[in-house]
Amino acid sequence: MDRETEDVLDVVGSRLRALRRDRGITLAGLAARTGVSESTLSRLESGQRRATLELLLPLARTYDVPLDDLVGAPRTGDPRIHLKPIRRSGLIFVPLSRRPGGVQAFKMIIPAVPEPLEPTPQTHDGFEWLYVLNGRLRLVLGERELTLTPGEAAEFDTSLPHWLGSSDGGAVELLILFGVQGMRAHVRADAPGSSHGSGHTRNGDTQL
């Protein structure tokens, strides 16, 4: 085995651990989804077990990512990034970042609906920053409800019950940055010296 291949395989374990923790999945939960024993997954993440195609394929299917993303294999040839949309709960997510762990970037598309949907707020660890590209976004956060239009942004702790939808039934496109607890994005578009209050700010950010 050449040195470059060994270097790639040496970091697979840490990448797998970071990806699993970022998705909020336990070893027991991952074992149930993949059919790979919990002890094998633990050894794989700690580097005590060498990654094989037989082990990586079910992990790639579970995480819905290409094999290259699991091993961090160097890309050659075509420099273009081929984005693969993910459909989940009626929403479309286009991953814009390829590194497991850390801050994840997505383009999110909320399809148009004939009738308003009933909010179903959810919670999870982390912070989320979003920026509306097109459409009118309905953001439900705890007891608060906001409507964000193109050019507006919001940042909030995802441990609070939250829900994203369309405020008028039309399609909504937005950019999302999601990070684990403690990792936050700060974007200021206001002129220096301007003040920020609570609530959302057009062409600025919402601190919630």
Image: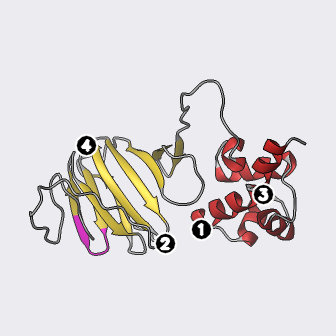
Name the chief secondary structure element in magenta: strand
User: Quadrant of the rendered structure where residue 160 is?
Assistant: bottom left
- Tell which circle, 4 or 3, labels the residue nearer the N-terminal end: 3
Q: Which mark is residue 125?
A: 2
Question: In the rendered structure, which amino acid carries the disc numbered 1?
Answer: Gly
In the foreground, 169 or 7: 7
Residue that extends furthest to the left in the rendered view of this protein: 194
Q: Position of residue 19 (x, y in %)?
A: 63, 59
- Tell which circle, 1 or 3, labels the residue nearer the N-terminal end: 1
- Tell which circle, 2 or 4, labels the residue nearer the N-terminal end: 2
Question: In the rendered structure, which amino acid carries the disc numbered 3?
Answer: Thr
Say which residue appears at 39% left-offset and 66% top-offset: 184
User: Which residue is tagged 4?
Assistant: 135
Task: Count residues near mark 4 (Cα–Cα under 10 Å), then give few for <14, some for 14-19, many for 20+.
Answer: many
**Element under disc 4:** loop
Relative placement, left or right, of 96 versus 28 is left
Q: Is residue 144 magenta?
A: yes
Q: Which mark is residue 186?
A: none
- Tell which circle, 2 or 3, labels the residue nearer the N-terminal end: 3
Task: Count residues near mark 2 (Cα–Cα under 10 Å), then give few for <14, some for 14-19, many for 20+.
Answer: some
Relative placement, left or right, of 60 versus 112 is right
User: Which residue is tagged 1?
Assistant: 24
User: Which residue is tagged 3?
Assistant: 34
Q: Is residue 182 magenta?
A: no
Residue that extends furthest to the front in the rendered view of this protein: 3
Separation of marks 4 and 1 at Cα, in angstroms: 30 Å
The boundaries of the magenta stretch are: 141-145
**Element under disc 3:** helix
Image quarter (top left, top right, bottom left or bottom right) of the N terminus: top right
Separation of marks 1 and 3 at Cα, in angstroms: 15 Å
- Circles 1 and 2: CB distance less than 8 Å? yes
